[in-house]
C-alpha cells in the first residue's frame, strides 16, 4: 500500500490540519479517564511542531448525534494534551465559523489549536462537502492520524482530502504498516487466534485470514458454534444457531486448503451467576451448564502453538474475561503473544482490554488503536480514510 506520509511534505511555516482520535473515555466529572489515545498521537504532533508547523487538531468525542452536548466538549482533552506536550493548547468552542477561522489565522508556527467536537455538526458524519471545505479552509495541509475512524467516510476523515494535500500521520502509518504486513508478507508459520462472543462479527476476518494463515485457533463464545457444528453437546452455552452451517462450511474449506483449525478440547463451564464452576470435555457440556472460557488443556495447547509461530494475530477474548475466574484462557494467549522473536499483532477493543489487564500492551509487537477499523482492514476492505492518503 503506497501511503503518502507526513515526511514527504514540506511543512515548515505551514498551517496543518490534523484529524486525531481523541475519542477518550471521560469520568463522571467529565475529565479524561484514559489518555492512551492522546499519547498515541503525540509523535505526530511533536513531529509537526518540530518541523515548524502551526498545528490545528480536530476530533470527535462520543456520540452527540449532530447537536452540542456540553459534556462532550473537548476542553479537558485540550488541558491533558497541554500537560503531555508541556505547552499551552488553544481551544475554540466550535470547529467551523468566523471565530474558528480567526483563531486558525492567528496561530503561529509551533503553536497548537484544538477545535471543538466535530460531531456537534450533523454534516461531519454525512461527509457534507461544504462542511469539509470549511474545515479545509483553516489550513494548507491535511494529515489523518485517526486510524480508529478510518473505516468511516466522514468530512474530517475523507472529505477534507478533496480540498487539501493529504498525508498519513505517524500513528496511521504505523497501523497500516503493522496490519498490512501480516496480510501481505507474514513470516510463517502464521497463526490467527480468534475469539469473542459472536461468529457473525468475525465472518469477514475468518474468510480473509483463511487465505494467509497456517492455523486458526478458535475460542470464546464463537468456538461454541463451531463445536456444535461438529456434533458436540453444548448444554446452555451461547450458540449462534443461524451460523452452524457457516461454521461447518468454514471447517471444510479450511481442510481443503490445508489450514489447521483448532477448537477447544476442554471448557470452563458454570451453572450461572455465582454458580458452580468446573472443567468439562468440550464435546459434552451438560445441560444446565454453559461455556465461559477455554479450559486449561486448551489454553496450554494454544499457548504452545502461538510460541512456535513466527507471526500471530489475535482478536477476541477466549472467554468472559471481565470476570477473573473466566479470564485464564485469554491471559494464557496474551502471555504467549509476548514470546521473544514472535511478531504479534492484536486488534479489538476487548482484546486490548485483556492486554491492559495484565500489563502486556507494550510487550506485543503491535496493539492496534483501531477496534472496528483494524477488523475491517483485516477483512480486506478498503478504508475510506486510508484510500484518500494513497499515492495515485
Ligand atoms: P474484541 O472487542 O476484542 O473484538 P469481541 O467484542 O468480539 O472482542 O468479544 C469480546 C466479548 O466476548 C467479551 O465481552 C466477552 O465476555 C465475550 N465472550 C467471550 N467468550 C464468551 C463466551 N464463552 N460466552 C459469552 N461471551 C463470551
Ligand atoms: Mg468488543
Image (cartoon, helix red, strand yellow):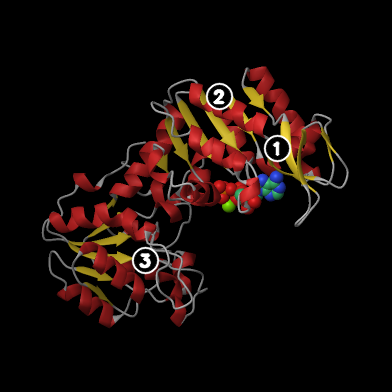
Mark 3 CB lies closer than 8 A to ligand 2: no
Please state which of the two labelled residues, at mark 1 or mark 3, is closer to the viewer. Answer: 1
Q: Position of residue 37 (x, y in %)?
A: 38, 58
Q: Which residue is drawn at 66% across and 24% down?
A: 254
Do the residues under discs 2 and 3 have CB atoms within 8 angstroms? Answer: no
Mark 2 CB lies closer than 8 A to ligand 1: no
- Mark 1: few, some, or many residues within 10 Å (few <14, many ≥20)? many
Viewer-closest of 290 and 246: 290
Q: Where is residue 136 in the image (x, y as percent from the top left)?
A: 29, 65
Horizontal relation, residue 139 to residue 147: left or right: left
Per the image, the residue denoted by label 2 is 305
- Mark 3: few, some, or many residues within 10 Å (few <14, many ≥20)? many
Q: Where is residue 172 in the image (x, y as percent from the top left)?
A: 35, 48
Q: What element carries label 1?
A: helix
Up-down: is 111 above or below 4? below
Please state which of the two labelled residues, at mark 2 or mark 3, is closer to the viewer. Answer: 2
Mark 1 CB lies closer than 8 A to ligand 1: yes
What whole-number distance in Å separates the C-alpha atoms at marks 1 and 3?
44 Å
Viewer-closest of 28 and 75: 28
Q: Is mark 2 on a helix, strand or loop?
A: helix
Q: Position of residue 104 (x, y in %)?
A: 21, 73
Q: What label sits on residue 223 in the rendered view? A: 1
Per the image, the residue denoted by label 3 is 132
Q: Quadrant of the N terminus?
A: top left
> Which residue ends up furthest to the right in the rendered image?
287
What whole-number distance in Å separates the C-alpha atoms at marks 2 and 1?
17 Å
Up-down: is 272 above or below 4? below
Amino acid at each position: 500500500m503506497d501511503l503518502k506520509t507526513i515526511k514527504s511534505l514540506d511543512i515548515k511555516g505551514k498551517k496543518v490540519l490534523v484529524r486525531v482520535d481523541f475519542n477518550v473515555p471521560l469520568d463522571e466529572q467529565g475529565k479524561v479517564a484514559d489518555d492512551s489515545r492522546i499519547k498515541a498521537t503525540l509523535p505526530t504532533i511533536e513531529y509537526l511542531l518540530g518541523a515548524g508547523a502551526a498545528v490545528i487538531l480536530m476530533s470527535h468525542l462520543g456520540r452527540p448525534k449532530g447537536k452540542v452536548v456540553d459534556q462532550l466538549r473537548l476542553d479537558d482533552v485540550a488541558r491533558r494534551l497541554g500537560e503531555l506536550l508541556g505547552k499551552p493548547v488553544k481551544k475554540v468552542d466550535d470547529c467551523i465559523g468566523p471565530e474558528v477561522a480567526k483563531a486558525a489565522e492567528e496561530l503561529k508556527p509551533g503553536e497548537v489549536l484544538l477545535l471543538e467536537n466535530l460531531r456537534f455538526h450533523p454534516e461531519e458524519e454525512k461527509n457534507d462537502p461544504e462542511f469539509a471545505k470549511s474545515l479545509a479552509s483553516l489550513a494548507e495541509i491535511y494529515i489523518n492520524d485517526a486510524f480508529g475512524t478510518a473505516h468511516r467516510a466522514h468530512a474530517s476523515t475523507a472529505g477534507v482530502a478533496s480540498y487539501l494535500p493529504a498525508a498519513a500521520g505517524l500513528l496511521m502509518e504505523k497501523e497500516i504498516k503493522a496490519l498490512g504486513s501480516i496480510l501481505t508478507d507474514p513470516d510463517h508459520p502464521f497463526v490467527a487466534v480468534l475469539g469473542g462472543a459472536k461468529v457473525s462479527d468475525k465472518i469477514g476476518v475468518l474468510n480473509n485470514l483463511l487465505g494467509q494463515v497456517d492455523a486458526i485457533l478458535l475460542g470464546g463464545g464463537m468456538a461454541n458454534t463451531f463445536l456444535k457444528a461438529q456434533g458436540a453437546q453444548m448444554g446452555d452455552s451461547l450458540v449462534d444457531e443461524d451460523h452452524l452451517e457457516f461454521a461447518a462450511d468454514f471447517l471444510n474449506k479450511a481442510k481443503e486448503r490445508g489450514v489447521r483449525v483448532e477448537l477447544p478440547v476442554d471448557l470452563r463451564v458454570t451453572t450461572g451467576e455465582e454458580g458452580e464452576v468446573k472443567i468439562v470435555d468440550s464435546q459434552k457440556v451438560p445441560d444446565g451448564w454453559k461455556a465461559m472460557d477455554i479450559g486449561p488443556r486448551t489454553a496450554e495447547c494454544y499457548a504452545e502453538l502461538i510460541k512456535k509461530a513466527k507471526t500471530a494475530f489475535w482478536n477476541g477474548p477466549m472467554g468472559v474475561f471481565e470476570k477473573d475466574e473466566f479470564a485464564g484462557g485469554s491471559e494464557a494467549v496474551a502471555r504467549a503473544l509476548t514470546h521473544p522473536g514472535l511478531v504479534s499483532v492484536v486488534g479489538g477493543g476487548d482484546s486490548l482490554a485483556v492486554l491492559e489487564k495484565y500489563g502486556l500492551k507494550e510487550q506485543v509487537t503491535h496493539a492496534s488503536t483501531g477496534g472496528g477499523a483494524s477488523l475491517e482492514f483485516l477483512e480486506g476492505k478498503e478504508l475510506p480514510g486510508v484510500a484518500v492518503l494513497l499515492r495515485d
